[in-house]
Each structure stands twice: as C-alpha cells, then as structure tokens.
Image (cartoon, coloured by chain):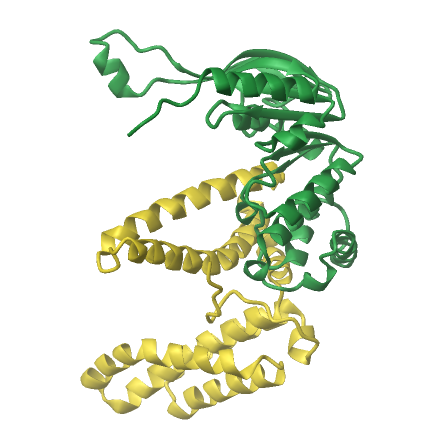
C-alpha cells in the first residue's frame, strides 16, 4: 500500500526570477502540487505530458525524490525517515537501462543486487544465474554489458531489481527506448509479475488496459480512474490544449 | 554506441588456471611484480616482465588479437615518454622504462581479463577491511573500484558518440563542439548512476 499524504514537491525559483520581481521573492516553482493518494491496486499506470511531473511522482514512491511538504509512505514506512527500508520494498526501473546497469557483465550486475544479503559468493552466483535463466539471459551471463541490445539491457535491469524480491516495482517508461517486439516482451513480463506494478508510460494502449490509471498535468493528478477512462481524459486534454503552431 | 576493447575493464570468460587462481593472490602478485620492476633497475628484468605478462595472457587463453593490439597501443603511447628519457638519460634507461610500464599495464590487463569485477571487488573489500576500524568503508571502496571499471568503456562510448554528433553537424574539427557535450553527458551519467545506486539500495 502506497500512500501520498498531501505530498508536494517545490523547488526555489531561480535567482533571475527573483531579480525580475525587484526585491520581492519569486514564488517557488511547483513540481508536484499537494497530492493525497492511496495506491493499493495491483496495476497502476501513470500518464501525462513530458514535464508534467509523472517521473517525479514515481520517484517519490521510493524516496529518490523526497516531498518538500507532506509525506509518502509505503506499507507504513516513511520515505524520508526510513528510505533504506522503503527501497528494499520498492524496486525502480529507469528508462535508460544503461544508467541502471552498474557492473561490467550481467552476472556481476545481478550479484551486486545481492551484496546486502547474507548469501555466500557461491550462493549469490547460483541465485543470479537462476534469475538470468528465468529471463532468458543465461547465455549472456558473462558477456560485456555494452554488447547487449537495448531490450536485453532493460531485461537485465529488471532482473537485477527482481532478484531482491521487492513488493512493489516502479517503472519509469521502461519500454520507451525499445523496439516493438521488445516492448511487447517487457509489457508481457510486467503483466505477469506477482508484485504491485506502478508504470509510468507514454504507451496509451498499455495504459488503457490497466485497472487504474492516473493522469498528471502540471504537477496535479487531474484524473484517477480506470485505464480506458483516464486515457480518454488525457486524449481530450491534449486535443483541447494543442501545442501552438510554429512556422 | 561503439564497443571498446581497450587494455582495462573487460572480462574474458574462461576456465584457465589464471582464471581459477584466487583474485586476492593475483592482485597481490600484480602489486608485487609492479613494485619490483619499478624499483629494481635492470633491463633483463624489464624484458622478462613483458614476456611473463604475454605468456600469462597466452596461457589464460585470452584471444591473441586484442592482446597484441593492446600491446601495440601501450608501446605507441609510451614511445614519446621513452624518447624524452632516451634524450636525457640514454637508450638503456628509456627501453627499461617503456618495458617496465608495459609490464605493469599488461599484467593489469591480464588481471582484469581473467577476474570478474565482483571477485576483484570482494578481495579488495577483504584487503581493506582492517581499515574499517578507523572509519574507512571498505564496502564503498570496493564498489567504487567496480564502478570505475564499468565507467571506462562507457566514457569511451560517450566520447565517440559526441564526436560523431559533432561530425554529423560539420563541427568535427572544433574541440568545444565535442568536449562540452562530453563533459555535460559525463556529469549527467554520474547523476543517473547515483540515482540507480540509491534506488538499488547500495
């Protein structure tokens, strides 16, 4: 259970903005307006325009971004004071798998996730190989990461997170950089997970299938209902406020 | 992104006795050998060092081509330095210096090619553990080493990426057209890596 309790994120306005106001301090820039939410559904999609705050919302769940005011809790653990424990429960997948994969080879990278466990090196290696096998990456266990395809790298990133058996998986546009076949493969993989999945995505077809879907706009959750209803609302919003045409 | 097959940072899987030797022993031998060739002024020793390193690479079953390429690059990049020493102190010392450095680099390449970064990090952690008493974090140090090993090929790939982007815009000759984006991308990469480390609870 993920709970946002009037959680907001603001950053101080840049100094130039204050200077323009002639002495009066410019108001803080709002990234996420005070938001109160309960996310208990097994599958939650988050959609919205670029820069709307959906990534920030996702990062707040595992404490990568802390609320400036209010609080975010996961299973009763506060992301501010119990960040470590929260991150043990919440796995996070970034859009750029290259940034997420830290070690030089897949086996080493998955083993790195297990460093904090009490397992011996041999057990960690066996467990990591087992997980890589489940993801169809066993043959690539010792191949340099830079030789993997984008899809294989994203799969590896997911394997590296799931090996620690988190309760929640937050995915920030995990399929944005993938081709269609890899996208379908990753979508299928996420759909089959026993974990709660929070998926930030631009793939409206996938979002429409979700039980619950949030639409974020200018830092505010403006719509919160079933996938198809939310996608409809987002389409209407985009149609009502198109980008200005330029020469 | 282009792959990179440089002297450091690439593990070549294998089952040779060099691969199987404990990583701590290999690390100690590398340190010892480097210290000896660096402090004992002897030309035969320097030549022997290079030969030993090549023999080790060969018996570890490392593919010959990249190794030879590495050797050539190492020697080429050391040549200007060797020339200066030759001019100042004479040929014997120059050759010795170049071969000493080549020994150290080749042995280090053999170590990283035959030892998984995780095993290397493990033995470094063990070696540094006594220092933990004085507030040193051996765990962090080991992770830092592993990150560095991964960063080397990534940095090279970033560099060739930004160079290609500059060339595509006809700016291939302007250093600031690729040095500035290279610096920015590297800092950006460091930030995302930091995020990834935090997210993974490390």
Query: Where is residue A27 drawn, in percent x and y?
Result: 35, 10
Q: Tell me if B38 is positioned left or right of A209 in this view.
A: left
Q: Any idea which chain is the yellow one in this picture?
A: B
Residue B39 appearing in the image = no
When the figure is inspected, residue B168 is found, relative to residue B58, above or below; the finding is: above
Residue B110 image point, x, y percent: 55, 75
Image quarter hosting the C terminus of chain B: top right
Q: In this view, does B13 lie to the left or right of B146?
A: right
- Is A245 placed left or right of A204 in the picture? left
Q: Where is residue A197 in the image (x, y as percent from the top left)?
A: 71, 31
Q: Quadrant of residue A105?
A: bottom right
- Above or below, A221 against A131 in this view is above
**Nearer to the camera, A70 or A58:** A58
At horizontal 51% and vertical 59% (from top left) the residue drawn is: B149
For image coordinates 35% across by 44% down, the residue present is B184
**Residue A135 on image: x %, y %:** 74, 51
Q: Which of B191 and B121 is in front in this view?
A: B191
The tint chain A carries is green
Residue A25, above or below A110: above
Q: In which quarter of the image is residue A71?
A: top right
């Amino acid at each position: 259970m993920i709970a946002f309790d009037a959680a907001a994120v603001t950053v101080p306005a840049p100094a130039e903005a204050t200077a323009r106001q002639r002495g009066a301090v410019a108001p803080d820039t709002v990234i996420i307006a005070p938001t109160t939410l309960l996310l208990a559904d097994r599958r939650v999609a988050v959609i919205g325009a670029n820069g709307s705050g959906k990534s920030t919302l996702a990062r707040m769940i595992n404490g990568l971004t802390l609320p400036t005011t209010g609080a975010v809790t996961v299973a009763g653990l506060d992301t501010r004071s119990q960040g470590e424990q929260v991150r043990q429960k919440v796995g996070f997948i970034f859009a750029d798998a290259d940034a997420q994969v830290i070690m030089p080879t897949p086996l080493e990278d998955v083993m790195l996730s297990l460093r904090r466990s009490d397992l011996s090196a041999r057990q960690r290696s066996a467990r990591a190989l087992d997980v890589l096998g489940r993801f169809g990456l066993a043959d690539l266990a010792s191949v340099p990461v830079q030789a993997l395809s984008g899809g294989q790298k994203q799969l590896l990133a997911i394997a590296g997170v799931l090996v620690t058996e988190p309760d929640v998986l937050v995915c920030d546009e995990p399929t944005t950089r993938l081709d269609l076949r890899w996208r379908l493969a990753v979508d299928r993989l996420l759909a089959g997970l026993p974990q709660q999945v929070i998926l930030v995505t631009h793939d409206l077809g996938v979002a429409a299938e979700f039980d619950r879907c949030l639409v974020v706009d200018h830092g505010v959750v403006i719509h919160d209902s079933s996938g198809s209803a939310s996608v409809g609302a987002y389409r209407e919003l985009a149609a009502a406020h198109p980008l200005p045409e330029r020469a | 992104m282009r792959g990179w097959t440089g002297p450091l940072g690439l593990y070549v899987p294998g089952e040779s006795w060099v691969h199987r030797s404990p990583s701590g022993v290999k690390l100690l031998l590398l340190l010892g050998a480097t210290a000896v060739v660096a402090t004992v002024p002897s030309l035969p020793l320097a030549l022997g060092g290079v030969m030993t390193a090549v023999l080790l690479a060969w018996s570890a079953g490392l593919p010959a081509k990249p190794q030879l390429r590495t050797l050539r690059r190492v020697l080429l990049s050391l040549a200007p330095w060797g020339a200066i020493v030759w001019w100042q102190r004479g040929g014997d010392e120059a050759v010795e210096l170049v071969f000493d450095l080549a020994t150290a680099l080749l042995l280090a390449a053999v170590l990283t090619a035959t030892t998984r970064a995780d095993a290397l990090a493990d033995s470094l952690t063990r070696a540094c553990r006594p220092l933990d008493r004085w507030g040193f974090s051996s765990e962090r140090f080991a992770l830092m080493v592993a990150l560095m090993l991964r960063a080397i090929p990534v940095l090279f790939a970033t560099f060739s990426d930004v160079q290609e982007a500059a060339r595509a815009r006809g700016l291939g000759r302007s250093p600031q057209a690729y040095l500035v984006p290279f610096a920015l991308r590297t800092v950006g990469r460091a930030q995302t890596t930091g995020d990834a480390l935090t997210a993974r609870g490390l």
